[in-house]
Image (spheres, grey):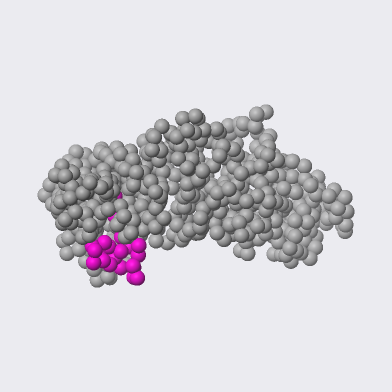
Amino acid sequence: MPPPGVCLNIVNERYKKDGRGTAENPDKFLDQDFEYLREYCLIQGMRYIDDMFPPDRTSIGPGILTPEEMERVEWVRPGKAVQDPYLFVDGVSRFDFSQGAVGNCWFLASIGALTFQQHILKKVLPTDQGFQKDYAGIFHFRFWRFGKWVDVVIDDKLPTLNGNFFFVHSKTPNEFWPALLEKAYAKVCGSYADMNSGDVSEALMDFTGGIHMTFQLKDVPSDLWALMHRAAKSKSLMGCGTPQGETSANTVLPNGIVQGHAYTVTGVTKVTSNGRPVNLVRLWNPWGEGEWNGDWSDNSPLWQTLSASERKQCLQVDDNGEFWMSMQDWCTYYKSVDICCLCPDFLDASGSCHWTSSFHEGRWVAGTTAGGCMNHKDSFWINPQFRIKLDKLDEDCASKQGPNNMLVSLLQKPDKRNRRLVSSLHIGFSIFEVPPEYQGKKGKFPAAFFSSNQPVAQTKNYLNAREVMEFFRLRPGEYIIVPSTFRPNETASFILAILSKNETHIHENSSVQGVEIHKPTVNENIMQKEAGRGKTENKLFRQYSDQYEEVNAEQLQRLLNDNFLNGVNSGGFSLDACRGLVALMDLSITGTLNGQEFIRLWKRAIQYKEIFFLKDTDRTGTLSLGELRNAIEASGLTVSDDILNLLALRYRGSSGDISLESFICLILRLDCMAKIFKKLSDSQGVGMFLRESEWMYLCMYS
């Protein structure tokens, strides 16, 4: 049984700080260790079969084959299909393969771009494997997935129908790197069917873990060709796509362009035609065939207007899916271009400015940190806030920089493994300049700040997309970046990436990292008046206690449900909740409460009850998750967004709100655990190391 998710999150964060999740030290996808599994198979003299991505219909997925075809599928190892299989034959090229039965042109176009960059290719396709030395039917590949690199293990069984491989296949029969790479990515996506349709930017990012930029060609920047030319020289990966037609089919237009299709940008050059300069873009169709037939296509007469040397350098007449277009025609018939790179210094024509990048993970949780866009004035402020300080530009960059000095990218992380089941939200972000009166303020900026301040930059639209990004020109100063979903109360995780020419300092704009303890804000007179009503604590205790003048969990349950709720419309305290309350108040560790321990519990419960109804501003008898934040604050505690999100997940009911009983259990546990940590910390707030017995002793009875 795996450990709870909160434990895994802590472990993953510590691994990240230790360098895990990098390209050099990737995480093991689904905890599968390639070296261990291969060594085990070699010792046992067996061929590996991957039980996490088995050679059966579940790995193919729905919608690709008919039920009759699925019954005839055979999974075959390359060595059974050909006599002398190799991972690579004469290197790696975009012309090695053609698309198969799944609609993943976006993925294959990205592979086409990957073949140009050997240093990146070696990260994705490790060279410590093959069909000759130490072959055990097991291979591994590496991808960047939402903030970290993962090492993905597969077996080499490939699906065939009527004796033919029906997914991506090599033009050289005994070369198998394209088919195995596709299988590894299918495993990451959930199945082959989960790779059907997508954007080329997705795989470009997963191959590089770098900075991604998208440019819409209907609103093309004046310097786009020059930027692409520099990007090509700086070892970037580039892809583009055409608009969708009237149907979802990949219709081939009379000019040879395929609608709703992804292409690789394989070249950018400038030629001289009849004495005039012409900017050209070279594209590759991952089908391996089918080309543009207009100006500058393979058989265009315009090639005769060039010098012989330019014509020899650029023109290759071959039906291999690759062709040239003028920049003007390309912008007319294509929708957008994606550029992905490890180092974005090509953004500057001078090449003298160096960009720095930082990545920050966060989460929107319905009711606590998912406030929606600025249309929702009362809740926008509860979204995660990131404070960023831009220092003064150095003189060299200040004198030569272009119009933009910052790129902000917001990437939403999926909540399901199967890619086809992931539902993207409409996301965007706003940037606000911090005025002088707020520059020393700690913690989240309140709703009043956003009511009186307008964003200095923001996304043009909230998009239902994996990622949104924008370029900005910001002067040195202090800013707040607020990423959000369009609608409030939508739960999702995200990665905020910030790329800047400036020296940049950024941190989450939260007042605490975990929990802080301070004085409660409840009115003491009201609390004492409430505590003195009806039966006294001592009389109550004597009425329900046993002969030893103690109450156990069952007795406490009856006491609280009979006397504490006082007509509150609720289901009452459960026995499990009362066991927890006893454990928190049980100083003598007997499993029961004596009179003094009970009175401590009763007085605190009365205090929290008063806070509960003071903060239940809509008088529903429950706390919304927005009201919960205020109630916790009034109880003498301040929590980070992460802790608040966990409390909401743990204690809210089916309606999404917090009942009185749940609030009392929540706040008592939160207060108790915060004080335990303070008690077990040194004067600098650094926690002691606990022995296993101490840890188990603490967590199993608290």
Query: Residue at the location (71% across, 44% down)?
Result: 637
For residue 287, above or below residue 697: below
Question: Could you tell me which quadrant the C terminus lies in?
Answer: top right
In reply to whether residue 252 is colored magenta, the answer given is yes
Q: Is residue 361 left or right of residue 92?
A: right
Q: Is residue 272 left or right of residue 632?
A: left
On the image, the x and y values in percent for residue 445 come to 66, 46
Which image quadrant for residue 254?
bottom left
Query: Residue at the location (22% across, 46% down)?
Result: 275
Q: Tell me if residue 42 can be seen.
A: no
Query: Residue at the location (59% across, 59% down)?
Result: 488
User: Main SS of the magenta segment?
Assistant: loop
Q: Is residue 602 left or right of residue 63?
A: right
Q: Tell me if residue 338 can be seen.
A: yes
For residue 61, above or below residue 525: below
**Front-most of residues 137 and 139:** 139
On the image, the x and y values in percent for residue 338 come to 37, 50
On the image, the x and y values in percent for residue 341 come to 37, 42
Query: Residue at the location (34% across, 47% down)?
Result: 225
Q: Is residue 570 left or right of residue 23?
A: right
In reply to whether residue 255 is colored magenta, the answer given is yes
**Front-most of residues 361 and 517:** 361
Q: Which residues lie in the magenta part?
A: 243-266
Q: Residue at the front extreme?
A: 275
On the image, the x and y values in percent for residue 653 come to 63, 61
Q: How many marks?
A: 0
